[in-house]
Image: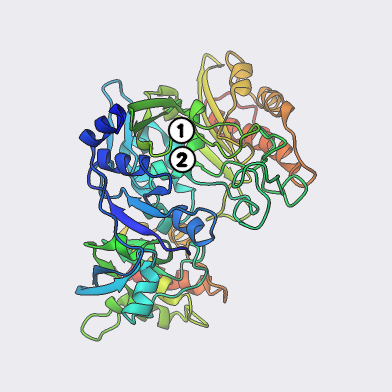
Amino acid sequence: MSADDQALTRRGTVLEERGPGPVRVALPVNGTEHAVEIEPRVSLLDALREHLQLTGAKKGCDQGTCGACTVWVDGRRVLSCLTLAVACEGREVTTIEGLAEDGALHGMQQAFIAEDAFQCGYCTPGQIMSAVALLEEGRTGDEEIKEGMSGNLCRCAAYPNIRAAVRSVRDRA
Amino acid sequence: MRPITYSRATDPQSAVATVSADPTSDYLAGGTTEIDLLRQYVLQPRRLVDINALPLAGIESTPEGGLRIGATTRMSDAAAAPEVRERFPMLSEALEKGASPQLRHMASLGGNLLQRVRCSYFRDPLAPCNKREPDSGCSALTGHSRDHAVLGTSEHCIAAHPSDAAVALTALDASVHTLGPGGERTYPLDDFFLLPGDSPHREHPMAHGELITAVEVPPTPVARRSLYLKVRDRASYEFALVSVAAALSVVDGRIADIRVALGGAATKPWRARRVEDFLVGEVAERRAFAQAAQVELAEARPTPMNAFKVELAQRALVRALGTLAEGTGLEDGSPA
């Protein structure tokens, strides 16, 4: 070992390596502690859909461009396709399945139905998770809603109705 | 996606020791570039070292009146910070106009600087690309190059630098603080981003395992009156065709201080020093802005597909500076 290496060892220890085979990951989702056996390369989206059977979050592009996989991690909307599940250990994950309370739909879910804010529905869970977070971020102006929902694509182009649903929830607050 | 291993770092020294000792390890911050390119086989690390738990997030004022923004500060948090909005509006706007709200919650400022180019050939492991695979050739030179750079190009690479925040930070003379096996280092941002030249695979001067710890923005009074203009194919959630970060101060009818940088049009965040040198001391009017813009773009080397950027960049420069000059009573009123 060279002198430089020794200096390095004093300053920092080489970290424990997990994987590449399946590792046990504790994943709190919608208020329930889960444990999954997954490879470190597994995305949060795949862990939710394939291992926890929470298929609400959708796989659209799987490369961070469509927003169909939007969930919350520690209360913030993120893309679960570009998030590794193993990196979420100890953080609170919320999916569309966790939005209803005591069997009653969340106000945003009701508004999407009332305003006819979807056609095929594939992007809808991501739209709703994004929309609820948007209002909680305090972006409530009409233009802010338009801009703040731009990370969620809708190929049926239900955009006017999606914006109407978000505005209706804002106006009820 | 290839199998990977995962380590979560709890102190910067261990993160640096781990990645420095292993050429097949990469850092994982927001993951918005890393995971995307891993899945496409463009990046092929064997191990990811997660730096999100490191104490590198947060914004603090420096004694001189500037800001030190921690490397893992999220884009959305940096954009919303009152001290960024008040003192450096161009930086807040550049961050806000990048990516989508979800991505801005994920992406770190350090990662934003190190994000990889959007050139479709770089992102396709089967296409020749000097940046991804040195000496394999540049597919964009004879291929699809509409989104590519017109400034700072070489015969080996014409990919445009994709960051918005880095454009504002370059105009602001920011510096990058790093921690490597040899200790701490500081790089002025303009030296941090390398022109492609004959080694487009080298994008920055850091050694493998060197970790960005913070970005420091010096006190810049002129930046209180600044903006970030982003011109793109769709109104939101899109990379820039051309962008301008500009700050302007006019005293007694003449330009006293000015900062300008261009994005989307160059292979690195492009400090428009020719614009600045041309305009200092000049009357703040549209004609002078147009002349300065022409001087800056004189050395542009466009392809047939992106030649429109030469004109677009000039118009964007004139519009950005014209907007800042409005209200000082000196703009001649003609539309930019």
Amino acid identity at mark 1: Leu
**Which image quarter is the N terminus of chain A in?**
top left
In the rendered image, the residue lying farthest to the bottom is A103
Q: Is residue A32 left or right of residue B201?
A: left
State the residue at coordinates (67%, 23%): B292
Write down the chain letter for disc 1: B
Q: Is disc 2 in contact with disc 1, using a CB cutoff of under 8 Å?
A: yes
Q: Nearer the viewer, residue A6 or B43?
A: A6
Write down the chain letter for disc 2: B
Amino acid identity at mark 2: Leu
Q: N-terminal of the two: label 2 or label 1?
A: 2
Which SS class for mark 2?
Answer: helix
Give residue B182's quadrant in the image. Answer: top left
Judge whether residue A43 can be spotted in this image: yes
State the image coordinates of residue B94 (x, y, percent, origin top left): 48, 42
Q: Does B326 sit above or below residue B7?
A: above
Q: Is residue B232 left or right of residue A114?
A: right
State the image coordinates of residue B280 (x, y, percent, origin top left): 58, 16
The residue indicated by pointer 2 is B113
In the rendered image, the residue lying farthest to the right is B304
State the residue at coordinates (65%, 27%): B332
Q: Residues within 10 Å of mark 2 (few under 14, many from 20)?
A: many
The residue indicated by pointer 1 is B169
Give residue A58's quadrant in the image. Answer: bottom left
Judge whether residue A168 can be spotted in this image: no
State the residue at coordinates (55%, 34%): B269
Which SS class for mark 1?
Answer: helix
